[in-house]
């Protein structure tokens, strides 16, 4: 049995800063990503089955989330790597099909830094 050291498990969301979404629109898109990724991570069909134990531990320890901003090209790279992606339906502010948010599965902060460490926090 693994020793239960306090691990720093975090779920990162990368918002497409090129789209200039309003605060409310951004919040809705991140909520979509959080919901989709959680449902997916709970599924036996998840492409991230190897991360299920991390997911459970993350849920039990407060579900820490960090929101970053990235450019369209950065989100596309992450999408190609198989991370969760949200594309807008185009009903309000932005064009249908626009890539709005990428969500990583919960993981050790140090591991995530290798993937998104060059990005900065979304402030406003």
Image: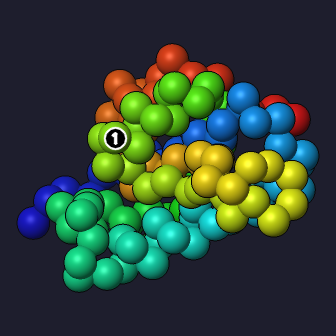
Q: Is residue 10 left or right of residue 51?
A: right
The residue sitting at the left extreme is: 1
Residue plotted at (36% across, 79% down): 42
Q: Which quadrant would residue 64 be assigned to in this image? A: bottom right
Which residue is depicted at the point 23% across and 82% down?
Answer: 44
Q: Quadrant of the C terminus?
A: top right
Few, some or many residues within 10 Å of mark 1 (<14, 14–19, 20+): few
Q: Nearer the viewer, residue 51 or 19?
A: 19
Asked whether the viewer can see residue 57, the reply is yes
Q: Residue at x 47, y 66 (%)?
A: 37
The x and y percentages for residue 81 are 30, 41
Q: Position of residue 62 (x, y in %)?
A: 57, 64
The residue at the point 58 percent across, 40 percent down is: 14
64 vs 58, left or right, is: right
Count of marks, rendered view: 1
Query: Measured from the top left, where is residue 101 in percent x and y?
Result: 60, 48
Residue 107 against residue 44 in the figure, above or below: above
Residue 30 in sight in this render = no
- Which type of secondary structure does the marked residue at label 1 adopt? helix
Q: Nearer the viewer, residue 50 or 72?
A: 72
- Residue placed under numbered mark 1 in the picture: 80
For the view shown, which residue lies furthest in the top direction? Answer: 118
The picture places residue 2, in percent across and down from the top left corner, at 14, 59
Q: Is residue 109 left or right of residue 72?
A: left
Question: Vertical placement of 73 versus 86: above or below?
Answer: above
Image quadrant where one finds the N terminus: bottom left
Question: Does residue 15 lie above or below 87 as drawn?
Answer: above
Q: Is residue 47 left or right of residue 21?
A: left
Question: What color scheme is it?
Answer: rainbow
């Amino acid at each position: 049995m693994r020793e239960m050291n306090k691990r720093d498990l975090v779920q990162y969301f990368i918002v497409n800063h090129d789209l200039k979404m309003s605060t409310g629109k951004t919040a809705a898109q991140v909520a979509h990503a959080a919901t989709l990724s959680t449902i997916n991570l709970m599924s036996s069909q998840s492409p991230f089955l190897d991360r299920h134990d991390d997911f459970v531990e993350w849920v039990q320890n407060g579900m820490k989330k960090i929101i970053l901003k990235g450019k369209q090209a950065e989100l596309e790279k992450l999408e190609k790597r198989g991370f969760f992606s949200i594309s807008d339906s185009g009903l309000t502010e932005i064009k249908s099909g626009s890539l709005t948010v990428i969500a990583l599965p919960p993981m050790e902060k140090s591991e995530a830094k290798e993937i998104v460490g060059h990005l900065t926090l979304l402030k406003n």
